[in-house]
Amino acid sequence: MQSSTIRAGRTASTLAALLAGALALTACSGGETKKEGGDGGATSGGSSLSLPKLDGTTLEVAAVWTGTEQKNFKTVLAEFERRTGAKVTFVPAQDPIINFLGSKIAGGQPPDVAMLPQPGAIKQAVQKKWAKPLGAEALKELRKNYSRGWQDIGSVDGTPYGVYYKAANKSLIWYNAQAFENAGAKVPKTWPELLTTAQAVYDSGVTPFSVGGADGWTLTDWFENVYLSQAGPEKYDQLAQHRIKWTDPSVKQALTTLAQVWGKKDYVAGGADGALQTEFPASVTQVFTGGDQPKAAMVYEGDFVQVNIGDTKAKVGTDAKAFPFPAAGSTAPVVSGGDAAVILKDSRGAQALATFLASPDAATIQAKLGGYLSPNRNVPESAYPNEVQRTIAKALIASGDDFRFDMSDQAPQAFGGTPGKGEWKDLQDFLKNPKDVAGAQAKLEKDAAAAFGSGS
């Protein structure tokens, strides 16, 4: 949706270059450094943000976040409670969140605000008349703190409904530094170099890749990075909107490339069956536990992986390092994702919470806790706890409107965001049988046509 405003071009290449330089610098420095002093913008103290007094008001916020991510967001909600006097309850939601919300609404108990992880989900919430437009104060914060592109992907038919509180850079591969050192493996910049690195790791006695195949969205992210790099941004937009079919030769090329990793014997921890039983958090932690013999040396996913690394003894920047997703085509890909706050029960309290989440105050609190990235351009760089995260944040803000949003998140929920269905299931099946490229394409096209045709 509104993909004409979400451009890649030269700034995507610049973002990839910035990330490559920063991550290489961190790999050489071998440690984290705190950056002192201010970088401009707002901080969590001394803010000019005005919020109403809401003593006696109770609010519910639903999101699919778990573990440390949920805990850190609750810290942000506690600050909102402190400032307003409201009482906010976090409601754990299940994927797909649209189905979860539908059951809550049918039972007459919708949460006041929901954190929706897909533009397609925002559109569905508007079509079902669940979502309420942002009020004047929330719009003021949104326009002051966000680029046009981030405003647009939270809008439907020109009306702003979503505040993108959380963003993600989904073009990173994290690796166990000791495993790389033991293997004499080099950080790759291209897909062929990635395969060479994987072979070096394998020859050292460690499985190259950990894949969280039990969560289908990790597989769609793999595909999107390869596809964007090979097919380019124009075709990426066309496939995202189903203006070209999944039987297109460009999809065949991307799946064939993916099969070079997914179909290589002993390159994936536990093989296909093991990967399909591995949920995303475990796919990360098993790379950074086990000493000299981790279950795998690398795991692909976004900057938010740092939250899961934090559940191990590994330190980001020393034990756990990252490199940009290698170029499978002419340029390295840059794919973004995010979660938007959407009001379901319009009230003074819900609008105040949306206003707070659109401010740099809220984002700065969670940025300091780590494993978080904000598209809010007025969050100070110094809020991020390590150099890798600061540079990722700086590059995201510098990209302005020039980025590509996660493709599956732009699709109808039935195709791009439902466990056991659509693209998630089709790519899980492909992980199990990566030789059947044509069969995977046929399934993907059948499911995409059904979902886009019904708008479900």
Image (cartoon, rainbow, N blue to C red):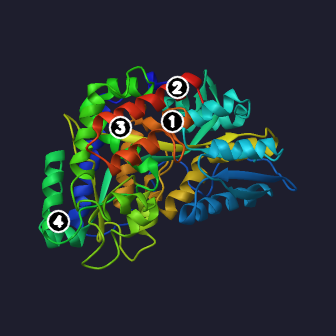
Which residue lies at the image location 36% right of the left edge and 70% below the top edge? Answer: 286
Q: Amino acid at mark 3?
A: Ala
Image coords of residue 232 (percent x, y): 28, 29
Q: Quadrant of residue 23?
A: bottom left
**Residue for badge 2:** 452
Residue bearing mark 1: 415
Q: CA distance from mark 3 to mark 4?
A: 28 Å
Lower position in the chain sequence, tag 3 or tag 4 = 4
Q: CA distance from mark 1 to mark 2?
A: 8 Å
Percent position of residue 214, x then y? 45, 56
Observer able to see residue 385: no
Q: CA distance from mark 2 to mark 3?
A: 18 Å
Closer to the N terminus: mark 1 or mark 4?
A: 4
The reply to whether dot 3 and dot 4 touch (C-beta < 8 Å) is no
Q: Which quadrant of the figure has residue 283? A: bottom left
* Alpha-carbon span between mark 4 and mark 2: 41 Å
Amino acid identity at mark 4: Tyr
Question: Which callout, 2 or 3, points at the residue further toward the start of the chain?
Answer: 3
Q: Is residue 328 left or right of residue 138?
A: left
* Residue type pointed to by label 1: Phe
Determine whether the residue tagged by mark 4 lies in a helix, strand or loop: helix
Q: Residues within 10 Å of mark 2 (few under 14, many from 20)?
A: some
Please state the total of marks drawn on the protein image: 4
- Residue sitting nearer the eye, 229 or 419: 419
Which residue was labeled with disc 4? 202
Label 2 element class: helix
Q: Earlier in the sequence, mark 4 or mark 2?
A: 4
Circle number at residue 440: 3
Q: Is residue 258 above or below residue 91?
A: above
Question: Which of the two discs, 3 and 1, labels the residue nearer the N terminus?
Answer: 1
Which is in the foreground here, disc 3 or disc 4?
Answer: 3
What whole-number distance in Å separates the C-alpha atoms at marks 3 and 1?
A: 14 Å
